[in-house]
Amino acid sequence: MLDTTPFLVGTERPFRLADHDPAARIGFEGGKHEGRSALGAMTTRLAELQRHLWAEGQRAVLVVLQAMDTGGKDGTIRHVFSGVNPQGVRVWSFGAPTELELAHDYLWRVHLRTPERGTITIFNRSHYEDVIVVRVRGLVPEERWARRFEHIRQFERMLADEGTVIVKVFINISKEEQRVRLQKRLDDPEKRWKFRRGDLDDRRLWDPFQTAYEEAVTQTSTEYAPWYVVPGDRKWYRNLVVSSILVRTLEQMDPRLPPPEPGLDDVVVQ
């Protein structure tokens, strides 16, 4: 398991993406083959811890995944959670809000999807779209989205106080790596359906998006809901880091199997 400390964003100073290399391979000397082998062991351990969390039924884990387009949120979910019991894991993707969702406050649809006790929920995009996308695209005035940082801190504080452990991951890819991945989508008939012309519009807004992410992480990385910035240019390394973060988090939680019903020692199934 990797030491996850280098990826943890502290609360002491403003966060800058320029300080984080998207192609870094911190704390791991091996290559792709060794990384995939290590991920297999982590996947087994994560599945064991998830079973204990489910059996204990007292706490929950919320994993927030954010990234630029092509950052690899889907791939991360597919590889890191490949061994868990689907009964105890949920994945929610947040796209453009529906008419019903727009009729409520922006956190309404998010709160509905937070994990129940004993489960892990993964947000593929999240409430952070409401301080990033709406800011960059000018969908709401600054005085409105700027207030939301405090809302989010308090929302996450409430979840944490009520037994939900929050892990927020920003998958950090380089602009060049995004170009390569977008081109691959265009060139591959099996992946072209994922390409949208709007992806190029967002790519032209790369710098404003980076600035928005920097402020969002700076404003909302807290002791009870920390951000981790994970290098995303190497997919296998990204998966290994995220898996290490989750395993370490669950090991610190130390979920316990409930005691068996008394008097079972002499029971024999006929």
Image (cartoon, helix red, strand yellow):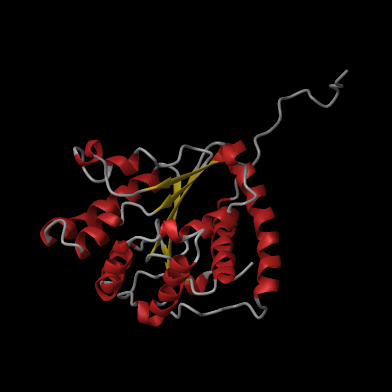
In this rendered view, identify the residue nearer to me: 232 or 154.
232
220 sits to left or right of 145: right
Q: Quadrant of the N terminus?
A: bottom right
| Residue 263 drawn above or below residue 209 | above
User: Residue 8, can we see it?
Assistant: no
Quadrant (top left, top right, bottom left, bottom right) of the C terminus: top right
92 over 30 or under it: above or below: above
Residue 1 can be seen, yes or no:
yes
What is the quadrant of residue 144 in the picture?
A: bottom left
Task: Left or right? Give the position of 66 relative to 23.
Answer: left
Q: Percent x, y for residue 223?
A: 40, 60
Q: Residue at x 48, y 60 (%)?
A: 191
Q: Is residue 89 left or right of residue 259?
A: left
- Above-or-below relation of 133 to 253: below
Residue 103 is situated, as x and y percent measured from the top left of the image, at 19, 37
Residue 208 place in picture, x, y as percent: 24, 72
- Give residue 71's quadrant in the image: bottom left
Number of numbered discs present?
Answer: 0
Q: Position of residue 177 (x, y in %)?
A: 45, 76
Residue at 69%, 72% in the rendered image: 33
Q: Residue at x 51, y 58 (%)?
A: 190
Task: Decide which of 144, 79 is in the foreground and name it.
Answer: 79
Give me the residue at 27% from left, 40% from top. Answer: 108
